[in-house]
Amino acid sequence: MRRTRNVLFVMSDQLRYDYLSCMGHPALATPHIDALAARGVLFTHAFCNAPVCGPSRMSFYTGRYAFSHGATYNNFPLRADESTLGDYMRPLGLRTAVVGKTHMQANPAGMRRLGIDPASPRGILIGECGFEPFERDDGLHPDQALDPDLRYNRYLRGLGYDSPNPWHDFANSAEGGDGSVLSGWQMRHASRPARVAEEHSETAYMTDRAMAFIEGAGDEPWCLHLSYIKPHWPYVAPAPYHDMFGPDAVMDPVRDERERADPNPVVAAFMDHSESVAFSRDEVRATVIPAYMGLVKQLDDHVGRLVAFLSDRGLLDDTTIAFTSDHGDYLGDHWLGEKELFHEQSVRIPLIVVDPGSHADATRGTRSNLPAESVDLIPTFLEALDAEIPDERLEGRSLMPAIRGESAEGWRDAVFAECDFSVRPARLALGASPPESRGFMVRTDGWKYVEWLCAPPQLFDLDADPDEYRDLGRDPGYGKIREEMRGRLLDWTLHRRLCPELSDAAVARRTGKAQERGFRFGEW
Amino acid sequence: MRRTRNVLFVMSDQLRYDYLSCMGHPALATPHIDALAARGVLFTHAFCNAPVCGPSRMSFYTGRYAFSHGATYNNFPLRADESTLGDYMRPLGLRTAVVGKTHMQANPAGMRRLGIDPASPRGILIGECGFEPFERDDGLHPDQALDPDLRYNRYLRGLGYDSPNPWHDFANSAEGGDGSVLSGWQMRHASRPARVAEEHSETAYMTDRAMAFIEGAGDEPWCLHLSYIKPHWPYVAPAPYHDMFGPDAVMDPVRDERERADPNPVVAAFMDHSESVAFSRDEVRATVIPAYMGLVKQLDDHVGRLVAFLSDRGLLDDTTIAFTSDHGDYLGDHWLGEKELFHEQSVRIPLIVVDPGSHADATRGTRSNLPAESVDLIPTFLEALDAEIPDERLEGRSLMPAIRGESAEGWRDAVFAECDFSVRPARLALGASPPESRGFMVRTDGWKYVEWLCAPPQLFDLDADPDEYRDLGRDPGYGKIREEMRGRLLDWTLHRRLCPELSDAAVARRTGKAQERGFRFGEW
């Protein structure tokens, strides 16, 4: 009987669900990630719970919706007492660490209220979202925000990349004919190669660091979150990946003039964001998307390198591997750039789970259309490790039915995601207050509904209009569907897990026991 | 200019909104509490946010709905990192303590995850809901749950009340003709006097202890939560209060045969609870309600004693006083006993706020029908103290507009309350799982709607049917109203405060600033 001993939780950043060959990309071959899918289950309908880095990751790492964990946007601090992946893994004996990005924002004020020194070992662990920071690197280091101690910069400098900020000047910049530094922040440079050698680029480096962690773990079981920084912008790929794809390999944009005719006010405000304006230009797409594809291709090669490394050490037989992304990237689809809103290109994610256990043999290489969410990963890891799944905090469900090939009775028939755009320019354009700058998506097989707190809703008929061109959110003919979707949303909110210490079983054990404990109320 | 220096937050337990003469009780004169109302503002439409002790109090003490603070029933632990009244008062220099009941359930597991020793000074403070436990006494001490160190029991024993549990055997029991102890747990004894002398009873004792705290505070400003244990059951009053009222002083029951004809399944299950069965008998009401009234009368006298004490020390001029209750008591109305459900008798509370500040002079002795909630008290105290009201956690609003006589623009037009009956026998009768055993009330001026997760809704037309006899929750003619009320409920849930460290102002300061900080995404 093979069974899980380690967990390798691989995340890519801003990787669209459809930019893998196993998910149908016509021009981008990702044989190594496809090989993972062939060894496990490919979840074709997986969704992040908040299509932006921070809140999405907090849902992955806490097993709770943003509505519950509360860190609804990048750099919004997570409550100090949220339990995280490490809190579930460490009691099982797994050393739990991160290599790469978490986008965790520590909560020193909350820690101080609790008497926890943020610089103490416990404070650091809480501040790192429960991960041992073997290599914490969120991958965005403009000069203004540069951490002078960034390990990757020290690494690059040690290799002779001479700059106060080699992350920017080498790994995320190209070079002009005159030797000038062409910043990757400017997308016009995306077709040029990064100034860093491929083997020193972020993707290669993080893979090396993951291997170093695994080597160092020795005989101790581990849970490693390898969290790649790419293909998130700056969109700059090192040679040879920078020109592996040409404009002809770029998929046609998923966009329609009807979308610009009378958009939902929130969508309209996002269409005015600089990234949307830029990505609505064909020139930008033709320049940037090949670089994005190159970054995915590079990522795939390093996934292959890592799997070979695990194979060489016999670790494939006892390591559960999950491969996913925190959200997608519009890349100009729907006249939008970046992510945050709820079209499939933004909210849908790739998800592969390889469980080495014998119980998973029957489903290897299969595809599951079970509606999966980010919050499902912690329960899945727990079940792979034969551990109990505490229901007092976790809001997702183990994906094991699909992995074991069992029927997933009572599985959710809708997925949920959230958006908080309170720090984005769209808020000012809409004249909305911070608490009104939020939206909630409910997506069933057939319908996608978005409730905006400061604007009318969106509604899409996914059967008749799979590309989501026709927003029925204000169409008087669809009031009944909207009402039904709002009912689902209400039902979802009212079922959030509230009490972090009481499992359903513990509650059930108390039911009707007050009188036994001497509280004899109601006695005559 | 007079202004607030101290806060005296007086809570009674299970005191119905209509058992005060200032709130219209025809036979129960409460001149001292009425005098408070004459010195301040009487909120005639105040509601608790969860009509049962624990969760209601946690809403008072955290300024957050149960849906946010999560301690949805008695003895469900509060998260260790919830900020409480003391966290708001102490930084302003107010020593913050409790005398009496909080029903706080500490969360040692959560504390240990955070490295906090529950027995350390900080652990004790967190475990006491942020109150210095000057005298913590939840007032329910059956032999099985007796704390051997209960201070009140030591006090009684010191006075010669000889028993291992004088709380039960003297303060909450009567005596038979043969000297036998007749337990107050048995309501048939409610017309007899307690075996304790009035001046040693819980209400007198807690008043004494409040005075001791205030004396001891000296020149230091303070916030004292004086939290009386009565008129909560056991319904036993000491002489002379035990027979101050006769059955003729008891108000007619608010109940109607229509209510039993086809009740909502949740209500039906509660009607089968022992306390409901008992209180549906006229004999029980005629025996118990006079004792309940006696306990209220006694409470009123001690409020008078306390106010005189404050007056003697010149403290009335700089002390904000709030008087309220955690919830009501059915006392047989609607064929129910106890509380928990959402009829007015259960969910509505008395509320008086006396602000000594000059700004409040214009409204002294006025009545306000502003829909007030438990969560409003912390913001009110903060504003009385001229302190900022942090909006990142607090979900209520300062009642100061009504106290200053200003228009309360944009004030809520609905109040909300919650019920979690997962540990009550009703859950078993309904065959519901713990997470399904919950309900949510929305009450506007005209309508009261209750969403049950495991049963059809309730709906009352408060204009046409102020006694709430006719449940329209399943009436096909009221679908549109129900839909509107569900919409209000959804709106309420989606506005819960999520991120405990970021105020709206802090968020607003960040809006649109990413590019300034060097994150130049979207640039061509």
Image (cartoon, coloured by chain):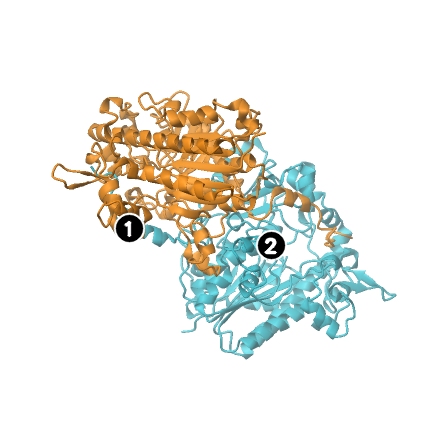
Chain colours: A orange, B cyan
In this picture, is B24 found above or below A100? below
Residue type beneath disc 1: Ala
The numbered mark at residue B54 is: 2
Residue B348 visible, this orientation: no
Residue A351 visible, this orientation: yes
In this picture, is B94 found above or below A5? below
Give me the chain letter of mark 2.
B
Mark 1 sits on what residue? A145
How crowded pointer 2 is (Cα within 10 Å; few <14, some 14-19, many 20+) is rated as many
From the viewer's perspective, tell me whether residue B486 is left or right of residue B301.
Answer: left
Give me the chain letter of mark 1.
A
From the viewer's perspective, tell me whether residue B55 is left or right of residue A345.
Answer: right
Residue B463: percent from left, percent from top:
54, 45
* Closer-to-camera residue (B508/B462): B508
Residue type beneath disc 2: Gly
Q: Are marks 1 and 2 in contact (CB under 8 Å)?
A: no
Residue A70: percent from left, percent from top:
44, 46
